[in-house]
Amino acid sequence: MSYYSPSIEKLIESFEKLPSIGHKTATRLAFHMLDLSELETNEFINSIINAKKSLKYCSICYNISDTDPCPICASPKRDLTTICVVEDVKDIIAMERTHEFKGVYHVLHGSISPMNGIGPDDIKIKELLSRIGNNKISEIIIATNPRVEGEATAMYLSKLIKPMGIKVTRIAHGIPVGGDLEYTDEITLMKALEGRREI
C-alpha cells in the first residue's frame, strides 16, 4: 500500500530509474523538487530539455558535445596521432582531470559483453578502425575499465590494430579491478597513464 498520492509515486519512480538512486534517495529528491518554486522547476526541466536537444555525438570521436567536432577534436593543441580509447563519455572527463593526456579520444559507448548480448558490432569499433585507416596514428592507448568486459574489449582491439603496425598500449592497473574510471582519483589515473604498457 502506498502512502503517497499517485503523482508523487510516479515522481519517486522516475527518480528511482536514475543510476545509483534507491527508494529513500528518490523520495528525498521528489520532495525536494516539490519544494522548488515554479521558476526553479521550469529552469530544471528546461535544462534537461535543452541538453537533450542541443547535445550531439562528435562525428570523429563520439564524445557528447554541443558542437561537431567536439572541442577536444577541434583543438589545434591536441596530438592527433595518439588516440585514447574509452568505454564511456564520463571516462573522458576522468582522464582530462589528470591534465596529463594531450592526445585525442575515441568513445566506444560500451564494451564487448557476450553475456549481455553486446558484440563488437554493437559498439564503436568499426568507427575506430575507419578513423585509424584514414589518419596517421602512432599509438592507441586502450583505457577500457579493468573488468572482464573491458579486458576482453582491450584484447579484441589489440588483435585488430597491432597488425596495422600501430603501437597499442593498455593503461596500467593503478585502477582497482572492478572499478570505473569516472570514480577514480586524478593521481591514480595519472599513474595508470604513465605506467601503460604495450599489449
Image (cartoon, rainbow, N blue to C red):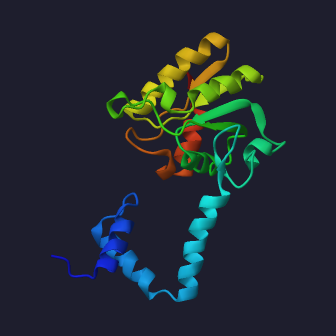
In this rendering, the answer to whether 138 lies above or below 45 is above
- Quadrant for the N terminus in the image: bottom left
In this rendering, the answer to whether 8 lies above or below 118 is below
x, y (%) of residue 57? 65, 46
Res 2 → quadrant: bottom left
x, y (%) of residue 18? 40, 61
Residue at figure coordinates x 50%, y 45% from the top left:
181
User: Foreground: 96 or 40?
Assistant: 40
Q: Which residue is outermost to the left?
A: 1
x, y (%) of residue 81? 75, 28
Residue at figure coordinates x 21%, y 82% from the top left:
3
Q: Which residue is outermost to the front?
A: 6
Res 79 → quadrant: top right
Residue at figure coordinates x 60%, y 17% from the top left:
161
Q: Which residue is outermost to the right?
A: 76
Can residue 199 be spotted in the picture? no
Can residue 72 be spotted in the picture? yes
- 124 vs 116, left or right, is right
User: Foreground: 40 or 82?
Assistant: 40
In this rendering, the answer to whether 190 lies above or below 49 is above
Residue at figure coordinates x 67%, y 32% from the top left:
83
- 178 vs 76, left or right, is left
x, y (%) of residue 131? 70, 27
- 171 vs 23, left or right, is right
In this rendering, the answer to whether 144 lies above or below 180 is above
The tally of labels here is 0
